[in-house]
Image (cartoon, rainbow, N blue to C red):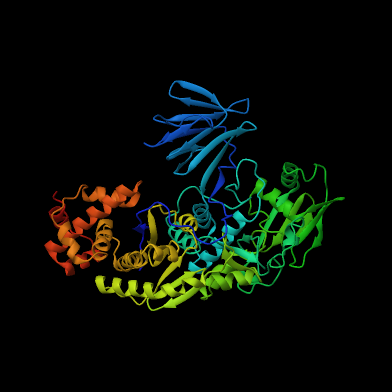
Amino acid sequence: MTRPHRILAAAFVSFVAMGASSQPPVSRPATLRVGMWTLWHDREIALTPTASTMLQTCEPCEKRVLHNAATVGANQHGGLTLLVGEHTMQVRAIRLSGGVTLTAHSESATLRDRVTITARGGTLVIAVTMPVERYVEHVVASESGLEDSTESLKALAIVVRTYALHESHGHPDYDLCDSTHCQLLHWHSDPHRSPAAHEETLATAGETLWFHGRRAIAYFSKDCGGRTASLAEIWPHVDSAPYLDSHTDKFCTKESGGWSSELTRTELTSALASRGLAAPGWQHLSVEHRGESGRVVTLRLDSITIHAEDFRIAVGESLGWNKVPSTWFEVSQQGDRFFFHGRGTGHGVGLCQKGAAAMAAQGRSSHEILTQYFSGAATADESTGKSWQSLARAGFTLETQNASDAPFLADLARARAEASERSGFNPSQPFTVRAFPSTSAFRDATLAPGWTAAFTEGDWIATQPLATLAARHLLLPTMRHEFLHALIEHEAGPRAPLWLREGLVELWSTDPDAWTNLRPRTPVMALDAVDAALLHSTTEAQSRAAHRDAAIYVLRLLDGYGRAQALEWIRSGVPADALARIGQR
């Protein structure tokens, strides 16, 4: 059973940073700067602070709390006008941290990541600095469809991450934009897509595509129409890549339907002029050259040649992306009217989302999907270039990049067995343990705070390097703790409170003799405050206190109602009278 919401369940360590691994230096960036609302060209936005919003108006300037709502506008001198209450400031840049809500063009978005606002050409430039994996999660949620399932989402996450990290995207003020020029990113969470996007991004954290030991480039489009396009057909200026060839896609069938549209000469003239492709006054438009997939490579506009992908982009930006959704088309002309008939949606290079969804529905794995669309390429960890290996044992599978982790399987098996013995739970579904090669890789993937040694979400467990945990005599207790989390989350119903699940793990992770010292203690926090602190602890001390109080409340529950009843309430939720009884402080 999968939890309907996301819980960070982690084992503590008594130090901030784990020991260094033997891996080479990490070349992967931890964050990306993402341009926000890049198609709107806003000249003014409103800022609504949270209780912890910090404002900085220059690099050496001191950060200060932003207490009041503010307005930021682009001025005539390439800078910003900041209005807070009755006070106006002229600044070159604004940096915001700690959470803030931005509002412009009748849209609002609340951001927790660092925001930098500057001006260029009389319009605002908003750059949001976010962890790589959070960016991937946002894009997967934005670009995926309702037909996607686990394996197609995993494949998409790997392609999205590869595209983001393996090439420059040509923006002077940020690394990637939030439009389809790079990869579409919606700033609001989609309740239907975000949970699955989160799970599959986490499951593939750090994985990118490689070809013969070198980082590959990767693209995806919505519907290839039954045959993918080669790289040279769409972007002839890009170096060739043998794994981005044109081939038939039997999973995205040609019989799925085509598209047609009608455009006037006036509409096309305006679109082409907006991109500087052709001046007004032209008369005839025809196909000049096609590529091996059948897509148009170049068009003839009277006496000049226009690249078909440039034509598609110009029409899409000016008239709508549904007018000429791909370059696989026929065009005919009747006077000042032009008729387009084609198939496919998008450029057609690389992964076809429609085909990938069909493959996943037929039981194909993400590996098989990526092999279909990137023949000869393979997935590997972005930081190390190593592939993940799977070692299966009863009740769990260990994913690791290091063959030297094999001897730790015995400790993991013991931890898994002890967790089942203490909880009484032993589902047939195996858990996945992914042992990251370094502390930084673990943190970048899970976004877990520095005081955690491992992280559990659903049936997926992430750990810092096993050798480091073993050297500090933490491997067995840490993994027992995480397997307990996975077992309880597998049993828990949607009404099971977080303090109950966390408290049971805390108790079952220790010997019953230790409960004697816990019984007389009085919790510091009320139950609601415990849940809030478990979800959003900002310090190790706060998190430890919340876990301790959760254990105290659960021990009261066990003493007052018995183990069997407490386990039933994991599935159904704790009734109000029991909450009132154990909540007395």
Q: Is residue 193 visible?
A: no
**Nearer the observer, 186 or 87:** 87
Q: Quadrant of residue 230?
A: bottom right
Q: Quadrant of residue 308?
A: bottom right
Q: Is residue 536 visible?
A: yes
Toward the right, the furthest residue is: 303
Q: Position of residue 278 (x, y in %)?
A: 79, 45
Quadrant of the frame with the N terminus: bottom left
Q: Position of residue 478 (x, y in %)?
A: 35, 64
Look at 21% across and 48% down and name the residue there: 526
**Nearer the observer, 115 or 318:** 115
Q: Position of residue 391 (x, y in %)?
A: 47, 76
Vertically, is 440 above or below 33?
below
Relative to residue 575, is residue 202 drawn left or right?
Answer: right
Look at 38% across and 56% down and name the residue there: 452
Vertically, is 426 above or below 135?
below
Relative to residue 297, is residue 555 drawn left or right?
Answer: left
Q: Quadrant of residue 218?
A: bottom right
